[in-house]
Amino acid sequence: MEKATVSIEHVDYSDGHGQRNVANVEVVGSFDATTVVLSAATGKRDYGENVAFSGSRFQAVAYHDWHPKLSTRTAATFSTDDPVFVNREVVHDFNLKVIPNTVLTAGGKYSKYHWDVSVVGLSVGATYYFNRLSTSYRYTGYRRSSGGNSHGNVASLRLKDHGGGGSTQLWLGKGTSVHEYEWMDELQDGKLRNASLRRVQPLTQKWTLDASIGKVWYETPATKFDGAAAKVGVTLAW
């Protein structure tokens, strides 16, 4: 199945830390055992006090089923050299199905940010599938070029609708990998907590509404604030 999604996202930061707005277009195509996702985004990060940056991003993701028990996900991201998106990123994950109703995941990624900081991350995780409910957990450890280690934990619950293609999903996260969520120079060290809720609601046979809300709490030696996010998108499948 092929589909295309248009979405917009707004993040509002507390205590005078500004806001972030992003518009994204995504196209998905399937070719035998491979699914390709291409997306392009434009965004603006306003830091307040007349400091703002605009940027653009292009991302390509390929999912491939090598075997009924082995699949991979490979992603590459490129953006303009601004603190709006991660500037360069390469990700590769292995997914292994060797336990009933369970997918084990291991992967790595390299990320480069505007402040001339690069990060290497290694992760492990698992997803367990019930009838309509799936649960997942992923741990990622990071090493920064500027020195120091950080980590992130993300747990998720996804409930499919009883009949139809809709679903509701909850994410909860905690760790010290603040660079994964915001690219301010002062946020290279610290702690964070995040929660987000997403609803995928079919409107017709071809059209789907995708809406989510979330919040991230930041705590660093220099500052403490939060970011509240809302995102809405519309998908056409054919």
Image (cartoon, rainbow, N blue to C red):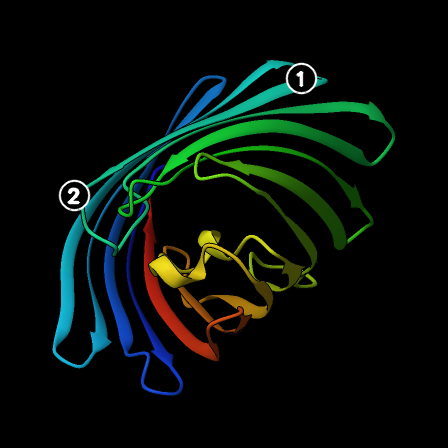
Q: Is residue 208 in sight in this rendering?
A: no
Work out whether residue 20 or residue 218 is closer to the camera in this orientation and state it: 218
Give the residue type at disc 2.
Thr
Choose top left, top right, bottom left or bottom right for residue 43.
bottom left
Work out whether residue 236 or residue 55 is closer to the camera in this orientation and state it: 55
Sequence order check: which comes first, mark 1 or mark 2? 1
Q: CA distance from mark 1 to mark 2?
A: 34 Å
Left or right of 82? Residue 145 is: right
Q: Residue 190 location, x and y as percent?
A: 56, 62
- At x 34% / y 56%, what residue is drawn? 235
Residue pointed to by mark 2: 80
Residue pointed to by mark 1: 70
Choose top left, top right, bottom left or bottom right for residue 42.
bottom left
SS assignment at label 1: strand
Number of callouts: 2
Left or right of 167? Residue 229 is: left
Left or right of 150? Residue 209 is: left
